[in-house]
Image (cartoon, rainbow, N blue to C red):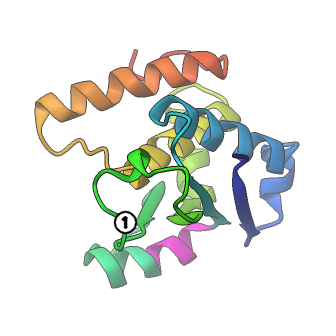
């Protein structure tokens, strides 16, 4: 089933940084979904908001109690079970959740890490999509597993290991 992806553009500079921005977002999110699902997975709707630091700062303060901008926020659909990719083919299409990315933070991090903004965004889209699918990195063991999965997915997108 194809990915039904809604992209909201809150800052016009994203168009230039991710040219072509819709294709870039779709490929990164789609690669993560493909890696994590099988033919029975019917969760094919999600939204990505390409915003700025002010926008994500407000969300981070409101929903996480952190009074600062961050690079990406993931808002999973709380009504989905933890077995989201094991739905039967008869189940209706479901909304996986929403990702929000912050332009200035991502630009700064990319420069500090000596990588392109586009590659950094692809990594954050994969990372965020994995969060929507229930992956986490709070424990060391989970972080190692999630990082290995990200590296594997990013390789399919021709993005080098972001953890080197």
Q: Is residue 40 above or below residue 8?
A: above
Res 109 seen here: no
Residue 58 as seen in the image, left or right of residue 66: right
Residue 158 as seen in the image, left or right of residue 155: right
Q: Position of residue 122 (x, y in %)?
A: 61, 37
Q: Residue at x 73, y 72 (%)?
A: 10
Quadrant in which the C terminus appears:
top left
Residue placed most toward the observer, 109 or 134: 134
Q: Which residue is mark 1?
A: 80
Give the magenta-colored segment's residue range.
52-57
Q: Position of residue 155 (x, y in %)?
A: 57, 16
Q: Residue at x 48, y 54 (%)?
A: 71
Q: Position of residue 128 (x, y in %)?
A: 46, 49
Q: How many marks?
A: 1
- Please rate how many residues cluster around mark 1, counting C-alpha atoms within 10 Å: few if below 14, some from 14 to 19, many from 20: some
SS of the residue under disc 1: loop
Q: Position of residue 158 (x, y in %)?
A: 66, 16
Q: Residue at x 48, y 56 (%)?
A: 72
Q: Is residue 54 magenta?
A: yes
Decide whether the magenta segment is chiefly helix, strand or loop.
Answer: helix
Residue placed most toward the observer, 91 or 74: 91
Q: Residue at x 51, y 29 (%)?
A: 35
Q: Is residue 94 magenta?
A: no
Res 40 seen here: yes
Q: Residue furthest front?
A: 90
Residue 4 in which image quadrant: bottom right
């Amino acid at each position: 089933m194809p990915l039904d992806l809604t992209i909201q553009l809150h800052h016009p500079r994203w168009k230039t940084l991710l040219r072509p921005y819709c294709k870039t977002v779709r490929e990164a999110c789609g690669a993560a979904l493909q890696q994590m699902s099988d033919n029975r997975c019917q969760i094919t709707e999600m939204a990505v908001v390409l915003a700025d630091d002010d926008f994500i700062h407000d969300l981070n303060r409101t929903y996480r109690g952190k009074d600062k901008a961050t690079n990406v926020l993931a808002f999973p659909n709380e009504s989905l079970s933890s077995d989201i990719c094991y739905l039967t083919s008869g189940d209706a299409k479901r909304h996986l959740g929403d990702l929000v990315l912050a332009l200035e933070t991502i630009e700064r991090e990319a420069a500090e890490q000596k990588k392109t903004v586009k590659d950094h965004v692809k990594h954050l889209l994969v990372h965020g999509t994995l969060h929507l699918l229930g992956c986490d990195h709070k424990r060391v063991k989970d972080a190692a597993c999630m990082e290995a999965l990200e590296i594997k997915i990013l390789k399919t997108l021709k993005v080098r290991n972001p953890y080197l």
